[in-house]
Amino acid sequence: MIRKQIKWLIENMDPKYRKLQVVALCICVASCVLLLVNPALSRRLIDDVIIARNPDPLLPILAVMLAVKLGREGSRYLMVMLMETDSQNLVFNLRKRLYEKMQYNDMRFFDNNRTGDLMTRMSADLDWCRHFMSYINYRIIDAVCTYLFAMIYLFTVNWKLTLLLTVITPALLVISKVLRKNVRPRFVFMREKLSEMNTAAQENIAGNRVVKSFAREEYEKERFEERNAAFMESHLKINRVWLTFFPMIELLVNAIQLVTVFVGGLFIIRGEITPGELAVFTGLSWAVSNPMRELGTLINDLQRFSTSAAKVMELFYNKPEITDSDEAVHHDGMKGDIEFRDVSFSMEGKSILRDVSFRAPAGSTVAVMGPTGSGKTTLIHLLARFYDVTEGEVLVDGCDVRNWKLQELRGGIGTATQDVFLFSDTVEGNIAFGDQELTLEEVKDFATRADAAEFIEHLPEGYDTIIGERGVGLSGGQRQRIALARAMAVRPGILVMDDTTSAVDSETEQYIQDQLRHLPYECTKFIIAQRISSMRDADLILVVENGTITERGTHEELLEKRGYYWQTYCLQYGLPMKEAM
């Protein structure tokens, strides 16, 4: 598992930085070799200078020791800089590719993944991938090489004493295996708690106006504290596991130093080693014990990296269900002819639409009415192929939407919804979002058609005014009108309006309806509304109830049927049902 994750990280590095990573790791290995030089020189210093009372080699030995020390520290500095550069390149590439992939994920992906969890993958999880490439990997190589090189060199000095030191290694390996087995599921659990905490924070920040409107600050505080406490407890569980094994590791590590001093002293008394050789053992005992001491920390970091990398890879390799089919054909433009043929749609086993059939010729206006949850908005989602139909066909210009290229299909549909999302950009930038080549004059023209020009001109910077996130600072009606201008500005073949004028007054609505009849281009208008005034002039009005079309016709025809449309008409115009015509 971890091997695949490391391979994946390396594959996502630019070739240049991949080579630098290899250079950095080679420097790491070389610095481990340099680590043996000074203990070897210390052996000569004690045996050939101090004990032999020969001062001649003193200065040359000290000069070489200083040069080796400076060389080792300089090489390690270069290594760290190279690894940090490599890791930053890696996280840059991964973040860019993940963001690109998320742009093309389908609606079902965003339905099934929480925003807070996705943000955690793009931030904390990615940072652990960077941390592995900049720190964990070289610490592992450094620990392994330091231990192996030190043991090999010590075997050449005195194999008996070295053999005693290796007896402790199997015990440490057993401890590390048990630690790794116990700590991984706890890291997975901790990662989930972090995601839940981030999701709670994200929802609270995004919905801060709702929280304040209902005076639920205390409730939200307690809700976040619960998740924060759960995240803290998950951390503590990991620490408890680590602290269970830490004393055993420390005991074995200290045993190495005790064995070195005690047995080494006996060997000197028996004349089996010299004081200089014992100095080599004491000088390199940390090179044997320190990697073992770091073993627990490295296992912790490695398991945490593996947990995070798995989450990032899951996002990286996710494949959207809605993609261009192999039979997708190119369209030069969209005329706007719409046809639903026996369309049924289900989601997670729940039927939402059943046997829906209708046709709206290019340039016509079709309006949809129905109770909340009847499936009206789903019609738009199927039209733009946010979801694929379960049965039947949705055709645009006589071609099944599944055989349209997604960019061409959605680029030909301009959508304005009741739930308006505006970007933290200028008013001009928001209106021109779908067509960046619009001139300011064209932006102003579409703003006028959406009855937004007057209030925009009264904003502090006019069309250059920065709108807050989600349109904060504007009224609901103002946001809807900017969204409508944005939809009209792409000059779509199909203009979709989902309760677009629900937050405007009747006079403004009438002005917008008049402007829609005189757009500078031909398009099919698809209107979802509850107001009779928004749809009475439509060429075709559909009433959707419980996922099926129960009424269809013009305004006059539906009034004669005395059904849902007629009842709504009576209620909105305050007429007794027996008098309404």
Image (tube, helix red, strand yellow):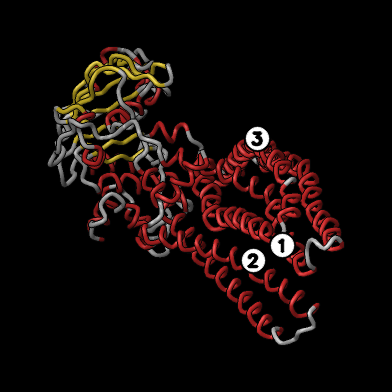
As measured in the structure, the alpha-carbon distance from the residue carrying label 1 to the one carrying label 2 is 8 Å
Most distant residue in the front direction:
271
Q: Nearer the viewer, residue 575 or 448?
A: 448
- Amino acid, disc 1: Leu
Image point (30%, 26%), residue name: 388
Quarter of the image holding residue 550?
top left
- Mark 3 lies on residue: 181
Residue 59, compared with residue 264, is above or below; it is below
As measured in the structure, the alpha-carbon distance from the residue carrying label 3 to the one carrying label 2 is 34 Å
Task: Please tell me whether mark 3 or mark 2 is closer to you in this view.
Answer: 2
Residue 456 at x, y percent in the picture = 36, 57
- Mark 2 lies on residue: 36
Q: Secondary structure at mark 3?
A: helix
Residue 488 at x, y percent in the picture = 25, 45
As measured in the structure, the alpha-carbon distance from the residue carrying label 1 to the one carrying label 3 is 31 Å
Task: Please tell me whether mark 1 or mark 3 is closer to you in this view.
Answer: 1
Left or right side of 404 for 550: right
- Mark 1 lies on residue: 284
- Amino acid, disc 3: Lys
